[in-house]
Every structure is written in C-alpha cells, then in structure tokens.
Amino acid sequence: MRIRKLTHVFVDTIPDALDEGILYVCIRFGTAAHLCCCGCRNEVITPITPSDWTFSFDGETISLVPSIGNWSFDCRSHYWIQRNRIRWAPTWTRVQIECARALDRAEKAQRYSRWRIIARSCRAVRDLAARARRRSGW
C-alpha cells in the first residue's frame, strides 16, 4: 500500500528498525531515513549534504530536495517529500536513470574538486607563511 504522508521524528541516531510512515531525521549525522513509500519496506537512506539532499523544516513539516528515486530497488519508486506529504512522480526509464546518475557524479566531482583546489591553496599559503616566519626569525 502506497504511503501518502510521513510523520517526521528528529532522532540522535537512526534506529535499527524503521517504522512505516515515519521519516527519521538525524541532524547529528546529517541523515534522513524512512521505509520506501511504495510499501515494499526497503530502507531509504538520504544523506543530507550540499551535494546530496537538503531538507527544510518549517516548524511543522519537513521537505526533502531533490526527489527520492529508488532506482536500485525492484519497485523503482520515485516521489517527492514535500511538507510531510508524498507527491508521486513518473517512473523513469533506464536511460533517464543513467543520465541522472552521470550528472550527479559530474556535479559531485566538480564540487569536491573545488574543495581540493581550495585546500591546496590554503596549504600553499600556510607553507609560504611558515617560510616567511623562519626567514624573519619569528
């Protein structure tokens, strides 16, 4: 039976056994989890990071962005969680899924390569500062 609405619960850790109809949100570990809303009972884990999912809490309801695409499950369910409600989306073809995965990998690579460049720049500045200190006798 398809779920139409989730109840959110903020937790310190994601429980070992998930209950149907509950969206567990763990700020501490940046993770949300629920059982697939199609009723297949597969566990859906959504990492909350700038390159995965983001969530908003308006004081009463939770929304997750982007959509939940359970492409690895037999059900291949696809839905949005908006204000604790499930909005079902069309099923994607294998080509659409592969294109979305490739785009996701490319966006993550671009995002994290920027961090590597920043880290290298910071190391270079730190090394220059250390050499300058040594030369000046600090």
Image (spheres, helix red, strand yellow):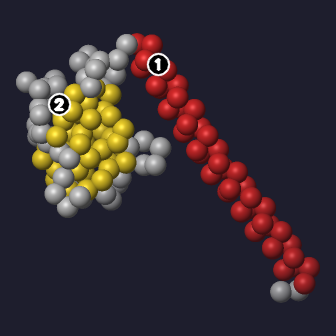
- SS type, badge 1: helix
* Circle number at residue 3: none
Picture coordinates of residue 9, whole percent (x, y): 16, 53
Q: As drawn, is 26 to the left or to the right of 106? A: left
Q: Say above or below: 46 vs 58.
A: above
Picture coordinates of residue 21, whole percent (x, y): 11, 39
Q: Say above or below: 14 vs 122.
A: above
Disc 1 target residue: 98
Pointers 1 and 2 in contact (CB under 8 A)?
Answer: no
Q: In the rendered view of the protein, which quadrant contains the N terminus?
A: top left
Q: As drawn, is 53 to the left or to the right of 33? A: right
Q: Earlier in the sequence, mark 1 or mark 2?
A: 2
Q: Say above or below: 112 vs 76.
A: below
Q: In the rendered view of the protein, which quadrant contains the C terminus?
A: bottom right
Disc 2 target residue: 37
- SS type, badge 2: loop
Q: Amino acid at mark 1?
A: Glu
Picture coordinates of residue 45, whole percent (x, y): 30, 38
Residue at point 78%, 61% (across, down): 124
Q: Can the viewer see residue 57 in this picture?
A: yes
Q: As drawn, is 85 to the left or to the right of 73? A: left
Q: Quadrant of residue 81?
A: top left
Q: Nearer the viewer, residue 130 or 117?
A: 117
Q: Can the viewer see residue 72 in this picture?
A: no
Farthest residue, direction right: 135
Q: Nearer the viewer, residue 91 or 109?
A: 91
